[in-house]
Image: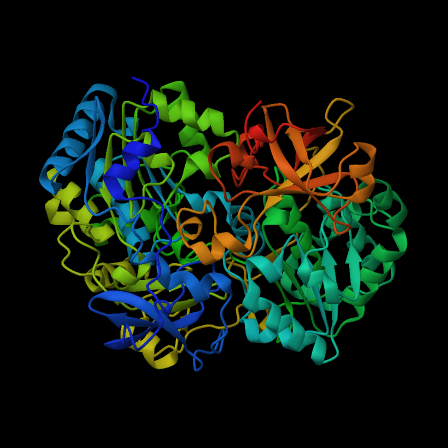
Amino acid sequence: MAKPPIPLPQLIELYGPHLNYEPPGGWQDESIHPADKLVKTHCCFCGQQCGIQLKVRDDQVIGFEPWEDFPFNRGMLCPKGVKRYMQNNHTDRLLGPLLRTDNGFNATTWDEALDFTVKRIREIQEKYGKDSVAVYGGASLTTEKAYLVGKFARVALGTKHIDYNGRLCMVSAGTAYKLAFGVDRSPNPWEDIPKAEVVMITGSNTAECSPITTEYIWRMKDNGGKLIVVDPRMTPISRNNDLYLPVRPGMDVILYMSILNVILREGLHKQDFIDAHTIGFAEVAESVKQYTPEVAADVTGVPPAAIEKAALWLGNAGAAMILHARGVEHQSKGVENCSALINICLATGNFGREGAGCVMITGQGNGQGGREHGQKCDQLPGQRSIDDPDGRAHVASVWGIEPDEIPTAGYSAMEIMSALHSGEIKALVSICFNPVISLPHAEFTKEALEKAEFVCIIDPFMSETAHYADVVLAGSLQEEDEGVVANVEGRVLHIQKCVNPPKDARVDWTIFVDIAKRLGREKHFDYHSSREIFDELREASRGGHADYYGITYEKIDKQMGVFWPCPTLDHPGTPRLFENAKFFHKDGKARFMLTPYRESGDPVNNEFPIYLTTGRVVSQYLSGTQTRRIGALVDMYPEPRLEIHPRLAKQHGIADGDWVTVTTRRTSATFKAMVVKTIRPDTVFVPYHWPGKKSINQLTHRTIDPRSKIPEYKVSACRIAKTTDSSTEGGSQ
């Protein structure tokens, strides 16, 4: 039965208006709200996981202080970090469970909500089979919760369909790194960045998406290093670059192969390193011969001289690093893009040393830890493949089940939504995921959720996806529970509990435990604290590549983080991978990977001649469920804008501030123009944090990388037209 969204007036009655309340003088006015305690913990947003001290009074977070001793950010915070404390007391917080009725949502008791949830799960699985129910997790959950979500799906529900919103973030890089190195982790601590002689940043709006990382870049430049930036937009990090390569969207891999072409042509590769520590070089060297700078320039839009210079700088550097993020990975050939970057670093011997490496910039808060311990459809704790018999046996022994009771690999996040749409999957249990905004082709996602026979959402706020739910379970924020996360470096951090969830909201893991017990699986979910879950996770990960066995809460506090792998209690952790060029494949060698070019799944043509690309802005985070409720952040960038080059704007008679309708092969939407010189003339850009008629993911397409299964957000074809009708702002036409 179709489940249309609940009207906003009714939602306001249920959980309060969208206010951004601050008391007179502000929350941090000590004369009004003196703090009872100061808790050292971490920011809840991006993968940097900066250290922060939260002020607590009367079981509420009322402000913050810098944590200057924490080594990653040394007290520095971005605008989101400065204001993150304001969400804890927000009037939009869900304060208890809600059940959908014929007249909308009604508040209910936990017993009624959980009994109803279990009843519907049982009815659906008895009728359609175990795999008719799917589970979505999230990369902003603590690692304990991520581990528990994976175990809940496989042991409590018995379904193979479990995946998470990190499928929209890091999986192209993770796939490429596992292919090349046998392990999925950035190999370098961030303190290596200032020691590089050359840093190339590609597909990363570093200053807005990973602001504290920018400081490491400036230290590199202060030390005399050179900065290369590759991007269709001149984002703030490129204002101080030494070389800018304005690559055409979707053509990255050709640019990288051309850089390698020049390195090999000039004899700048390290043959001794290649012979001793790698496999597959000859095939890759042959494959890049055709991509001379002149050939690549015609396709990528980057001048041949700029390609030559980038290659010579990287090839001649004593130590070079390549940093990459979503601009590279959000493509239907995202794995090839990442592999091509790895090939450059392998060819130049840039691994296992200070200032040398190919490094993924993790996006989501626990994007690293959240993908290591079992909420990916193809992975078990410790980064074990779900198809590995030894790994299955080890995890099964920890869980107290037989190995064949662990389901095989199921669908990825995009495939789960497709199966909901087709009717193959009938029900969804989701936490920390807002697919109505974050998945491409939003109308398809809405149709799928309307077709579902049962949807359960666990969230601290009423997300846009929760409007389609049958039951909404009021969950917790990061500061309301204890746990660990792994930051962008692979440094495992301790999240300290600061306050309790408000009123009748509950800590997330207790919700899963109670559902599992009602499903008759209580002996496998006998937890009474996050520490108990973590101790089981440590054992489950033992012997895997992502080995957490030697990590404890106390050790993290003492060392201010512990880098995995950490196999024993007396092991110090592993800040830098591949020292002595020892890679994680059984033979100890890294793999060069072939990176053939493929056309985008949504190519430009005469009807849709302009590239549409998407991304973030500094004041917002992901789908905005949290940040769009903080007034000081909303004011920084209140609405999505269409960035457009003056030349393209002139061709269409568009001036700054005009309304522009963007049309793709899916639908149309209208945005206010921001005419800037910092974008390619064949490309437009819109950020993706907004819902409804303001959502750019109405327009994006559902093509996925065949190996990583990540959507191609960064490359869509569109046409544009000026409009005078502002009533269609951000809306479908």
Query: Which quadrant is the N terminus positioned in?
Result: top left
The number of numbered badges drawn on the structure is: 0
The residue at the far front in this view is 24
**How far across and down, in percent of the image, does residue 143 sit?**
33, 57
Task: Tell me: 535 left or right of 590.
Answer: left
**How far across and down, in percent of the image, does residue 530 sit?**
22, 61
Q: How is the image coloured?
A: rainbow
Name which quarter of the figure residue 111 lies in: top left
Q: Nearer the viewer, residue 468 or 91?
A: 91
Would residue 177 be seen by someone viewing this image from the given angle? yes
| Residue in view at x 33 percent, y 19 percent | 2
Q: Nearer the viewer, residue 109 or 60?
A: 60
Task: Tell me: 252 left or right of 161.
Answer: right
Would residue 367 be seen by someone viewing this image from the given angle? no
Task: Tell me: 433 left or right of 274.
Answer: left
Name which quarter of the figure residue 36 lies in: bottom left
| Residue in view at x 71 percent, y 81 percent | 223
**How far across and down, in percent of the image, does residue 605 sit?**
76, 25
Q: Is residue 720 above or below residue 620?
A: above
Query: Which quadrant is the C terminus positioned in?
Result: top right
**How far across and down, in percent of the image, does residue 482 sit?**
26, 64
Q: Is residue 36 above or below residue 299?
A: below
Name which quarter of the figure residue 44 lies in: bottom left
Q: Is residue 529 above or below residue 15?
A: below
Task: Tell me: 560 left or right of 243.
Answer: left
| Residue in view at x 72 percent, y 61 percent | 238
| Residue in view at x 40 percent, y 58 percent | 369
